[in-house]
Image (cartoon, helix red, strand yellow):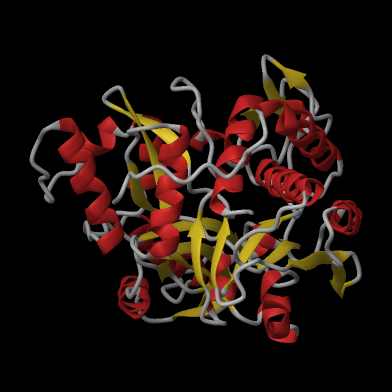
Amino acid sequence: MTSAPLPGPGLPQDSAYHDEVVRICRDLIRIDTSNHGGNVSRGEPEAAEYCAALMRDAGMEPRVFESAPGRASVVGRVAGWDRQAPALVLHGHLDVVPAEASEWSVDPFAAELRDGMIWGRGAVDMKGMDAMILTVLGELHRSGRRPRRDLVVAFFADEEAGGVYGARWLVDHHPELFAGATEAVSEVGGFSTEIRGQRAYLLQTAEKGLAWLNLTASGAPGHGSGVHPDNAVTRLSGAVHRIGHHEWPLQYTKTTRALLEQVAEICGVEFDETDPTAQLDALGTAARFVGSTLRNSSNPTGLTAGYKHNVIPGRAEATLDVRFLPGQEEEVMDVLRELAGDGVDFAHEHRDISLEVPFSGDLVDLMVRCIQAEDPGAPVLPFMMSGGTDNKSLSRLGIAGYGFAPLQLPADLDFTGLFHGIDERVPVQSLVFGCRVLARMLEPR
C-alpha cells in the first residue's frame, strides 16, 4: 500500500475537535439506548433527535424514520464538491447492549470523564465514532468546506440485534436514501494495536456471517420412572454436546491470510498456515478478534426442556450461535445437521450474510494514507471481525462496507475486551486522533 502523504487539507488544531467530540460522546452515552433484542429497547428516538439537531447545525436536512414505535434512525445527506464521484455512506448506530450497573465501577450511563477517558456503555461501540462523525461534519460546515464525495450520513437503530428495525428496514423501505453510493465506512476497524513494539492499524475488510438457530428435538412424553428410549431431552443433549465440542478446521480467507502473512513479515518469520499461534500472540489483545475469524464456530447458548422431575417432556429446545466464514454457510449447516443427528430440527431465529471486500482500491488507499499522515510509517493491515455491522444490510444495495473508526490507542489498553464489556471506555485523545483522520478522509476543500 502507498504511504505517500496527503496534501494538507487545512485541518484545524486539536482544540477545534477536543471539546466538541467529548461533549457529543458524553451526551450520547447519557441517553440510555439499551437494546435487549426482540424489539425491546429504549432511548433511540431521543438519540436520533439529538443527532438530527447536530446534523441540521452541520447544514443537512435530516429525516428521522420510525420503523416501529420507539425504534428510530436518522439519515441526512451532504453534497460533495466532486459531482462525478460516487456517494459514500458514513454511518453509525444509536443502540447499545445492556449494562448491569452493579458490575461496573462507574455508572454505565453517566459518561464520567476520568483518567483522560470517557467511561460508559457505548464509548467504543459505537457512540465514540458517532461523536467523531458529527464533530468533523460540524467543523467542516462551520469552516465553509465540503467533502469531495456526497455523504449519506446515517445513525441507525437496532444494530445490536441485527438491524431488523434499523439499517435492514431502511434498505427495504427507503433504498432511495442511498442512491449513488458505492461504499460505506463505519465501526470497529481503524484502531491501533502493537505488533512486537510496532504500532499498526487494523482496517476491517470482512465480517463473518451469522445464524442464530433454534434446535428442537421431539420424543414420546411419559412417566419419569419408566424405561424410555424415545427421550427428547436425551436426543437434544447429545446433539448439543456434539455441536459444542466440534473442532472446526483452520480456514483462511483472503483477508485473514493477508493479515497473518503481514504480521509474520513484521515479526521477521515465515508464516506457518498449520499453526498461526505465533502471529496471534504477536497481535496482543487484538488476537481476541482475529483468532475467532480463522475458523467457523458453533456455540450452544441455551437449553429449555421439561416442567417436572417425574415427567418426560415430548419436546426439548436449544439455541445456537453460529458464525461462518465467507462462502461457508451451506457447508456449515450441512455439518451441523450431521452432528445433530436424526430427530433434531433446525429453525433460523435470525441470519445474516458474511462479507469480504478488497483491501485495495481508491478508498482503501485513501484510508491508509490518512492513517499514515497522522502516524508516519505505521502499517495498516486488513482484518475480519467475527461479529457483524450494518454494512451487511447496505451490501444488499451493492454498497461495499469497510470498518474504519480510526483510534490511536495506548499499548496497554485492552481495547477489544471493551466491546460489550464491563467498564467500557475510550481515551479522549484517541477520539481527537480519529477526528483528524476522518477529516482527511473526507478530502474537504
Q: How many marks?
A: 0
Question: Left of 198 or right of it: where is 373?
Answer: right
On the question of residue 350 being in view, the answer is no
Residue 365: name its quadrant. bottom left
At horizontal 72% and vertical 20% (from top left) the residue drawn is: 105
**In x, y percent, where is residue 394?**
58, 74
Residue in front for this viewpoint, 225 or 150: 150
x, y percent for residue 183: 52, 69
370 or 445, which lies in front?
Answer: 445
The answer to whether one can see residue 133 in this image is yes
The quarter of the image holding the C terminus is: bottom right
Picture quadrant where residue 202 is located: top left
Q: In the shown orientation, is residue 130 left or right of residue 41? A: left
Residue 43 drawn above or below residue 362: above
Q: Give left or right: position of 397 versus 160.
A: left
Q: Quadrant for residue 149, please give it.
A: bottom right
Residue occupying the point 36% across, 72% down: 336
Residue at x 40% of width, y 48% of height: 368
Relative vertical location of residue 348 with respect to residue 173 in this rendering, above or below: above
Q: Position of residue 103 (x, y in %)?
A: 70, 27
Above or below 376: residue 47: below
